[in-house]
Amino acid sequence: MPTTIKRQKIIDAVEARARTILTTDPVGYYSNLGTNVFVWLSRPLQNTGVISELPALVLRPTLNEPIELRAGSPPVQIDQLMIDWEIIAAPGSLTEDRVWEMIIDWYKAIGTDPTWTNLASDTNIGPDSFDYDQKENTLVGASGSIVVVYRHTQYLES
């Protein structure tokens, strides 16, 4: 059964849009980051000779914050939904330039419709950072956040 909860609809729309990040898309993306998109991934990514989930975009909705209440019958609440994101890639053939291209692809996908088909009023891009992890396997990537501003009836999100 499809969800009626507005924030879940937004998360589903963000995930669906991220999956369009393919070099074959008419928007003109640099990468195929949309091949491996995950929401709340709770297991290690696969990166073997047979199965590779890298590069990947991992989305984590982390905070929903009410920012305004407008009087009315019924009252309308405006919220900010923060979604942290992480691009994870294996090094080697991936240079820093390729990771920057993936970041630009992600932002371009957001910019195609920052209202997520009228589920939200706007989406703001937060700061991003370039990351290296050299514990067991060296990984390269980036992380950041977006904030989706949306409205709903107070005490209801449908």
Image (cartoon, rainbow, N blue to C red):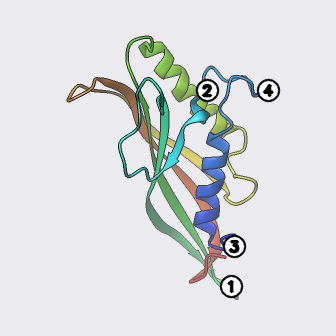
Task: Please identify, in this view, whether the residue under mark 4 or under mark 1 is nearer the observer.
Answer: 4
Return the residue at label 4. 26
The CA span between labels 3 and 4 is: 31 Å
User: Residue at the spot x=75%, y=58% of the render?
Assistant: 118
Return the residue at label 1. 72
Q: Nearer the viewer, residue 11 or 136?
A: 136
Callout 1: SS: loop
Callout 4: SS: loop
x and y percentages locating residue 93 in the rendered image = 44, 11
Q: Nearer the viewer, residue 14 or 46?
A: 46
Q: Residues within 10 Å of mark 4 (few under 14, many from 20)?
A: few
**Above or below, 3 relative to 94:** below
Q: Amino acid at mark 4?
A: Pro
Q: Amino acid at mark 2?
A: Asn
Return the residue at label 2. 32
In the rendered structure, which disc, 4 or 2, sits on the residue that comes first in sequence? 4
The CA span between labels 4 and 2 is: 13 Å
**In the shown orientation, is residue 43 left or right of residue 20?**
left
Q: Nearer the viewer, residue 104 or 50?
A: 50
**Above or below, 10 relative to 38:** below
Task: Please identify, in this view, whether the residue under mark 4 or under mark 2 is nearer the observer.
Answer: 2
User: Residue at the spot x=47%, y=21% of the render?
Assistant: 99
Q: Amino acid at mark 3?
A: Met
In the rendered structure, which disc, 4 or 1, sits on the residue that comes first in sequence? 4
Position of the N terminus, as image quadrant, is bottom right
Q: Amino acid at mark 1?
A: Gly
